[in-house]
Image (cartoon, rainbow, N blue to C red):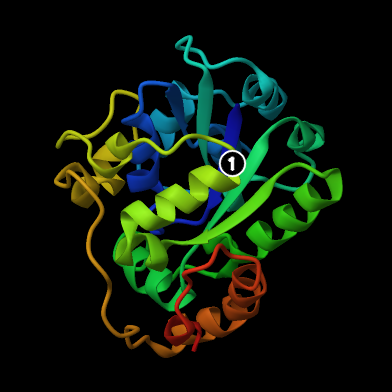
Amino acid sequence: MNVAMWSGPRNLSTALMYSFGARKDFDVWDEPFYAAYLAQTGRNHPMRDAIIAAGETDPAKVARRCMASAPGGQKNFYQKHMSQHMLPGIDRDWFGSVAHVFLIRHPARVLASFDRKLERPGLEDIGFRQQAEIFAQVRATGAPAVVIDSADIRRAPEGMLTRLCDALNLPYDPAMLHWPEGGHVNDGVWAAHWYDAVHRSTGFAGPEGPLPALSAHLQAVCDAALPHYQALRAHSLPGTSEADSH
């Protein structure tokens, strides 16, 4: 099975990649379209030149690999995708050939975290609009489209991962709860800038506290993102907190 996991930044996405990477039946791929995204947009992200040099800038070639067998020879192939990397014009015909999971997180939490790494992010930087668009496109193909909230995973990792595996018709593997400290061999070259916290981890962090206070700029972006989050959340696996929707 090929699984495309769609997320925005600062959303437990790397930890979930490590979780699937801890299974012996999965290969993982970290942000396949990142180099193509930077090359096409000209965005000045940290480590931009290194990312472009290390990655594939032709999105058509990336899409073909997304449909192909796992490169390491494993039975299953997990792909950690950033929703904002799927720019208009990138071929999406491959969507119907893989299973899809949509990892969501309240935009206030995303923005508070992302602003510490990339100042004054806008709506297009955090992927909520694109994630909702991709969800609609995937559902139109009839491919599996599972939604899960990162807050629920942090509150009950084993229970939510079991539900996620059930939704994908995969057996749950307890190995998904832990991974070695220091990162994964398949981390992207950008890990040195973005993954410091998860590199210190060996499992999922505990539940989060109240929603953070935001600056006026970030609050405006949050307000624009919130309808997209709430629309996806309406389809999420059982366990999503009502308290986190406000």
Residue 114 position (above or below residue 227): above
Residue 53: where, in percent of width, then height? Answer: 45, 23
Please tell me whether residue 205 is drawn above or below residue 138 in the rendered image.
Answer: below
Identify whether 82 is placed above or below 72. Answer: below
Q: How many marks?
A: 1
User: From where the camera sits, is residue 167 visible?
Assistant: yes
In the image, 48 versus 60, the foreground residue is 60
Q: Quickly name the residue at label 1.
A: 168
Near mark 1 (Cα within 10 A), the count class, few <14, some 14-19 or many ≥20, is: some
| Horizontal relation, residue 228 to residue 209: left or right | right
Position of residue 196 measured from the top left corner of the image (x, y, whole percent):
20, 47
The residue drawn where x is 23% and y is 34% is: 183
Q: Is residue 68 left or right of residue 72?
A: right
Amino acid tagged 1: Leu
In the rendered structure, the answer to whether residue 44 lies left or right of residue 99 reads left
Instruction: Give the residue drawn at x 52%, y 53%.
Output: 7
* Callout 1 secondary element: loop
Residue 85 seen in the figure: no
Res 18 quadrant in image? top left
| Among the 4 quarters of the image, the one containing residue 189 | top left
The residue positioned farthest toward the right in the image shown? 140
The quadrant of the rendering that contains the N terminus is top right
Name the residue rendered at 27%, 45% in the picture.
195
**Is 203 above or below relative to 174?**
below
Which x, y percent locates residue 230? 61, 77
The part of the image, by quadrant, that contains residue 159 is bottom left
Residue drawn at the location 32% of the way across and 62% of the way down = 154
Q: Position of residue 199 (x, y in %)?
A: 19, 42
